[in-house]
Amino acid sequence: MIASAARLRGGSLLLRSPRGPAVGTAPPAVVARRASSSSSYLPRVTERRPDESGRGGRASDAGVKVCVFGATGFLGRYVCSGLGTNGVLTYIGCRGDDFEHRHLRTCFELGRSRFTFYSSRDRHRDRQSMADVIADADVVINLVGKYYETRALEDTPKFPFLRYKVNTSFVEANVEVPKAIAELCTELQVDNLVHVSSAAAGPDSASEWARTKYDGERAVLEAYPWATIVRPTQMFGHEDMLLNWFANMADRAPVVPLVDGGHALTQPVWVDDVARTICRIVDDPEKFEGRRVDCFGPRDYSYAELAKFAYDVTGQEPTLADVPAEVVKSVAKATQFEGRPTLTPDMVDLMSEDYLPEMTAEGYAAQKREGKVFTMKDLGVEARPIEKEAFKYLHRFRSGGHFILAEGYH
């Protein structure tokens, strides 16, 4: 492999693959803009190269290979859509059967994606399966995360002969797997790593999920110091666990609890804005090496305000009750055993704390260039207000849908 650049990192000589024209090919005098490109936010992707074939966009070759772990999650499908729309060859790590990730296949043109099974149960024993996913990728994106610990029943020798065991813990999902990915990126000399953490990550949080997110950041940076850390606040979108949570709770019960009155603040960000930000990092990853990118919405809300907003859209009329966190936790200890839990004790801890970016928008803008923490605005992504998007997926909770409000349908 011919290298266009090399650098010494942690004692290892890392070689960069050329991403421009083939060796010996003269650069064109005029670079033609793709006529059919569906996006303008990936300049490297939307410029036609002399050795490129295809119509552009999905049907073209972006000249970069990206590996995605955690693609089947909430954020993952939006990231894959952005990569596939612009012809990025994407390697996707899968831990389940084909039914769990088949919806992602439509994001890509034929031949522009590869799905590879891997196992993370024992990061030492199954390391090779994770390495097989990464292969020759230029950029690795880690989106692995879980808001609850998965559980399963197992036999016991004594009565009641069954008990729940933890299948995947917060430590495994948020610390051990990201660390293994970062170590493999170093060993395989991957050019860039993008690790998605959370704005709630902190060593002193009451939530174990938030604490392990923080530990995961530290582990990744220890193994791969030039990784890019993306820290979004709570994300809202069609499959979210924020506005949908309130709407689903109103369908299930006449009373919806607000943890400690719902006074804690959050600053939700549109999930597609976070995905677009990640895609822009992929376009110029060297610029963001070893840096942090914070993603957040245009304004903050209390959980009580979000609940009232959601019910204003859906037309539901539940009773909102001010319930102490400890009381809600007692209920969550039972509901945490659901297949996809509506409420867990750790969720209660998270909802009792502010879920905000580190600084205000003015604070980010006033930073000095040295050591600057980037935001979506620095990458040209304007935060979408929650009021502009919520109706698109909350109207399904209306009695009669949105047609009930229009004449001529009934």
Image (tube, grey):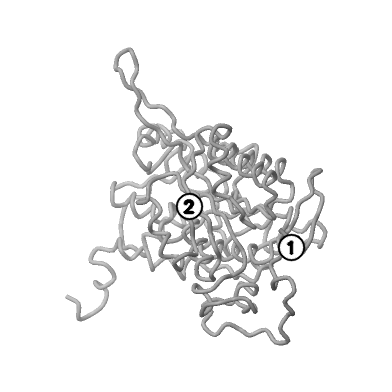
Q: Position of residue 56 (x, y in %)?
A: 53, 78
From the viewer's side, name the closer residue of 367 and 19.
Answer: 19
Badge 1 is on which residue?
287
Which of marks 1 and 2 precedes in the sequence?
1
Q: Name which residue lies at 59% across and 54% down.
A: 141
Can the viewer see residue 368? yes
Disc assigned to residue 131? none
Q: Residues within 10 Å of mark 1 (few under 14, many from 20)?
A: few
Quadrant containing the N terminus is bottom right
Name which residue lies at 33% across and 21% down. Answer: 155
At numbered mark 2, what does the secondary structure look like: helix, strand or loop? Answer: helix
Give the camera-side residue of 390 and 337: 337
Query: Outermost residue, front direction?
Result: 24
Q: Position of residue 211 (x, y in %)?
A: 60, 38
State the image quarter where residue 334 is shown: top left
The answer to whether 395 is drawn above or below residue 135 in the figure is: below
**In the rendered structure, which amino acid carries the disc numbered 2?**
Tyr
Which amino acid, mark 1?
Lys
Look at the numbered discs 2 and 1 and tell me whether their residues touch, using CB distance below 8 Å: no
Q: Residue 348's x, y, as percent?
A: 47, 40
> Which of 3/226 is in front?
3
Q: Residues within 10 Å of mark 2 (few under 14, many from 20)?
A: many
Residue at 38% x, 50% y: name it.
100
- Could you give the CA–CA distance between mark 2 and mark 1, rounded to whole angstroms? 36 Å
In the structure shown, which secondary structural element does the residue marked by tag 1 occupy? Answer: helix
| Location of the C terminus (image quadrant) | bottom left
Is any part of residue 363 visible from this angle? no
* Mark whose residue sits in front, 2 or 1: 1
**Where is mark 2, residue-wise?**
303
Q: Quadrant of residue 394?
A: bottom left
